[in-house]
Image: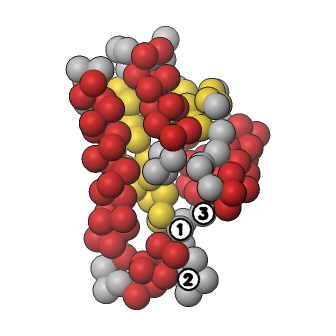
Amino acid sequence: MVSRVLVPMDDSEMAERALRHALETYQDAEVTVLHVVGEPSGMMGEATRLALADDIKAAANELASDVFARAESVAEEYGTEVETSVEVGHPGRAIVNRAGDFDMVVIGTHGGSLSDTLLVGDVARRVFRRSPAPVTVIR
């Protein structure tokens, strides 16, 4: 029986599809939405904002707020709630590290843009190959 489901989310349509699948398939499970914010560096968009922040955790939570608002809105459509969690780091690694606490991981195949497709597609592949929990990949 699946009682705890991890749904990694970014702001893509595929991530929302993964959340909808999890909510429809595992109606009695506790669903946790995880958003991973890139490690602070001067080379990447949102990570640059983290690198300049005084409080990295607060900045990461702020960056995740739109994703979480969307996830909570989707959950509301299903008459349920979701837990939310934010991590800072490499997305694939962070998801795999958290996966052991769950019975199932449901992840979208890729994000919306070409760069998202390359990056998040690699993330889904890494999670699929290395997760200690079973993984369902949604496209």
The amino acid type found where label 1 is placed reads Gly
x, y percentage for residue 123?
Answer: 67, 50
Q: Amino acid at mark 2?
A: Ser
Q: Do the numbered discs 1 and 3 sit on residues whose CB atoms are within 8 Å?
A: yes
Q: Which residue is mark 3?
A: 90
Nearer-N-terminus badge (1/3): 1
Residue 59 in the image, given as x and y percentages of width and height: 33, 72
| Side of 66 where 22 appears, left or right | right
At horizontal 39% and vertical 37% (from top left) the residue drawn is: 32
Colour logic: secondary structure
Residue 41 circle label: 2
The earlier-in-sequence mark between 3 and 2 is: 2
Instruction: Name the outermost residue toward the front.
Output: 113
Measured Cα–Cα span from mark 3 to mark 2: 12 Å
Question: Which residue is nearer to you in this view: 73 or 54?
Answer: 73
Evaluate if marks 2 and 1 touch, with contact meaning CB atoms under 8 Å apart. yes
The disc label shown at residue 114, or none: none
Per the image, the residue denoted by label 1 is 38
Cα distance between the residues tagged 1 and 3: 6 Å
Cα–Cα gap, marks 2 and 1: 8 Å
The 10 Å Cα crowd at callout 1, few under 14, some 14 to 19, many 20 or more, is many
Residue sitting at x 33%, y 32%: 74
Instruction: Residue type at mark 3: give it.
Output: His
